[in-house]
Image (spheres, grey):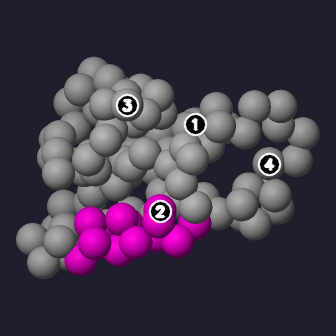
Amino acid sequence: MKKVMISQPMSGLNDAAIKETRRKATEKLRKEGYEVADSYFTEEWIGLNAGGVKNKPLWCLAKSLEVMSHCDTVYFCNGWLEARGCRIEHEAAVAYGLEIYEE
């Protein structure tokens, strides 16, 4: 079974909107036979794990790249081109030969 990570815009969105986009993407990907890697870091999780971090968005990007290293495919949700982190994840996926799947 191929493992996939979801890359989605998050800036300016509330937790409910982010989770709903992830829910829909996860449902679609599972139906297609993918195992979906968890790459969503809640504020609570960040608070518990990011002690001393000066740039939390950069730290979260690094954690996402770590998750990506366990995947075969990266699924890019609509709007990814306007999201700095998603664009960096896309560049990494291309550079390291991961399969790209766009919504």
| Mark 1 touches mark 2? (CB < 8 Å) | no
Nearer the observer: mark 1 or 3; the answer is 3
- Measure how far apart labels 3 and 2 are at the Cα level: 15 Å
x then y, percent, for residue 18: 47, 62
Residue picked out by circle 4: 50
Nearer the observer: mark 2 or 4; the answer is 2
Q: Single out the residue that lies furthest toward the left.
A: 32
- Which residue occupies the foreground of this view, 22 or 59? 22
x then y, percent, for residue 42: 64, 63
**Magenta span of residues:** 15-27
- Measure how far apart labels 3 and 4 are at the Cα level: 26 Å
Asked if residue 82 lies in the magenta stretch, the reply is no
- Measure how far apart labels 2 and 4 are at the Cα level: 20 Å
Q: Dividing the picture into quarters, in which one does residue 56 lie?
A: top right
Q: Disc 4 residue type?
A: Ala
Nearer the observer: mark 3 or 4; the answer is 3
> Residue, x 28% and y 72% (percent of image)?
24
Q: Earlier in the sequence, mark 3 or mark 2?
A: 2
Q: Disc 3 residue type?
A: Glu
Residue picked out by circle 3: 82
Q: Dividing the picture into quarters, in which one does residue 25 lie?
A: bottom left
- Residue 89 in sight here: no
Residue picked out by circle 1: 62
